[in-house]
């Protein structure tokens, strides 16, 4: 196929996919039937892992629970059976240990069968700034949050590709899309997990294994044990997420074969802004959203504090942009090179509109999150 035809095909299909997305706003996709599927959830002894197991319980699946906490898994097993699960198996497994992952995976295949829905949920966070984090904890973070995904994929993906049927679910984080102050190792591990999941998804498409679906979940901070004590600067813009809400959205994404799930919905806009703004503008927006703060020290009230905070931050942004305009204007007069003048004028135009843009962004997100 020549260049012209391929280009035309891309344009036509892009229009079609956009129209499809609009239709989906009014006609939600039908949930797929997962009865009889074997669902393996890592980190199932507590938190989101336990909630996901409870949500799957009445759907007629066989549940396989992995965790390093025996008591936690026993409690999860009891809860899911109360909710209707009839086939529940749980195994002690340290997902950071490759040999143990392979050993327990072989045991699952013998005793239960081939896993068809794999949910990599296990994760840890050190909660320390980069220079304060011991090397051992950094390594452990990557072993659990990233490398475990490699080993579980290696163990269970071959059967999925052989049958051209299955679902790979990566519970990542919004911190895998945007760097967060004080979470360098955690962010890096989640960036890696997202990149890995995306790459494998493309490999599956390239080899014609489109029956094996992928879902990548990127939530903001969730009110679970991992992020106890964390707060958010503007709760109306970026709320700390309720675990049950997150679990429901993940189940919905799996049942509708949704590839990306970002929570809350404001993250879709924030990611787009990060990738389109200049670095200085993105840094200003990051400061406004609280990226420079320690999440454990954010104690802003959600109502009056939010309103006054918006006024203060937007005023600061406006003054910074106006100051930048004056400085660049003075420099512009000294320049003779027309290319420099063009570049300076672009910078001035961008800086002058940052505060207005942020203001509009704030208002839009408030309305968007209210639905």
Image (cartoon, helix red, strand yellow):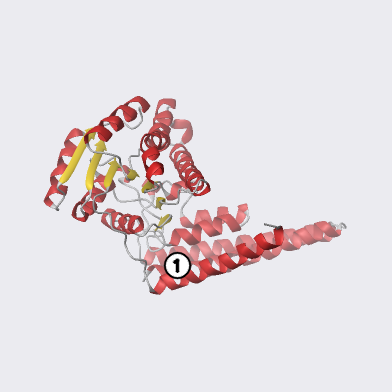
- Is residue 230 rendered to the left or right of residue 36? right
**Residue, x 36% and y 48% (percent of image)?**
166
Residue 345 appears at what percent x and percent y? 75, 63
Image quadrant in which you'd find residue 307: bottom left
- Is residue 78 rendered to the left or right of residue 239? left
Q: Please determine whether, in this image, residue 203 is positioned above or below residue 148.
A: below
Image quarter (top left, top right, bottom left or bottom right) of the C terminus? bottom left
Q: Nearer the viewer, residue 32 or 66?
A: 32
Residue 192 appears at what percent x and percent y? 48, 40
- Whether residue 181 is visible, yes or no, is no
Q: Please determine whether, in this image, residue 122 is positioned above or below residue 328.
A: above
Taking the view exactly as shown, the residue that stands out farthest to the right is 336
- Whether residue 122 is visible, yes or no, is yes
**Residue, x 40% and y 38% (percent of image)?**
158
- Mark 1: give few (<14), some (14-19) or many (20+) Cα within 10 Å: some
Q: Nearer the viewer, residue 203 or 295?
A: 203
Residue beneath disc 1: 365
SS at circle 1: helix
Residue 14 appears at what percent x and percent y? 57, 65
Image quarter (top left, top right, bottom left or bottom right) of the N terminus? bottom right
Q: Please determine whether, in this image, residue 70 is positioned above or below residue 263.
A: above
**Residue, x 17% and y 44% (percent of image)?**
87
Residue 208 appears at what percent x and percent y? 49, 49
């Amino acid at each position: 196929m020549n260049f012209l035809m391929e280009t035309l095909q891309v344009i036509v299909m892009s229009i079609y996919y956009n129209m499809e997305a609009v239709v989906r706003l009014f006609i939600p996709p039908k949930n797929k039937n997962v009865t009889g599927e074997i669902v393996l959830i890592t980190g199932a002894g507590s938190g989101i892992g336990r909630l996901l197991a409870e949500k799957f319980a009445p759907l007629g699946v066989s549940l396989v629970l992995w965790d390093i906490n025996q008591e936690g898994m026993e409690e999860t097993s009891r809860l899911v059976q109360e909710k209707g699960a009839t086939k529940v198996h749980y195994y002690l497994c340290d997902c950071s240990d490759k040999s143990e992952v392979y050993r327990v995976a072989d045991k699952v295949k013998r005793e239960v069968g081939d896993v068809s829905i794999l949910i990599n949920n296990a994760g840890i966070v050190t909660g320390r700034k980069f220079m304060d984090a011991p090397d051992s904890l950094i390594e452990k973070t990557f072993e659990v949050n990233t490398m475990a995904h490699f080993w579980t994929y290696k163990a269970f993906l071959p059967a999925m590709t052989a049958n051209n049927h299955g679902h790979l679910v990566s519970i990542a984080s919004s911190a895998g899309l945007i760097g967060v102050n004080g979470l360098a190792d955690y962010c890096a591990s989640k960036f890696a997990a997202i990149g890995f999941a995306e790459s494998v998804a493309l490999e599956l498409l390239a080899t014609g294994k489109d029956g094996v679906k992928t879902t990548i979940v990127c939530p903001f901070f969730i009110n679970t044990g991992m992020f106890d004590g964390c707060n958010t600067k503007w709760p109306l813009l970026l709320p700390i997420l309720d675990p049950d809400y997150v679990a429901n959205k993940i189940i919905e994404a799996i049942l509708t074969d949704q590839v990306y799930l970002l929570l809350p919905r404001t993250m879709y806009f924030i990611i787009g802004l990060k990738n389109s703004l200049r670095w200085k503008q993105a840094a200003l927006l990051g400061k406004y959203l609280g990226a420079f703060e320690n999440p454990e020290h954010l104690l802003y009230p959600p109502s009056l504090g939010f309103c006054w905070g918006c006024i203060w931050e937007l005023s600061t942004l406006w003054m910074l942009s106006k100051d930048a305009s004056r400085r660049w204007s003075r420099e512009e007069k000294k320049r003779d090179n027309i290319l420099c003048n063009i570049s300076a004028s672009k910078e001035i135009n961008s800086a002058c509109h940052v505060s207005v843009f942020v203001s509009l962004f704030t208002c839009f997100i408030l309305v968007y999150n209210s639905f």
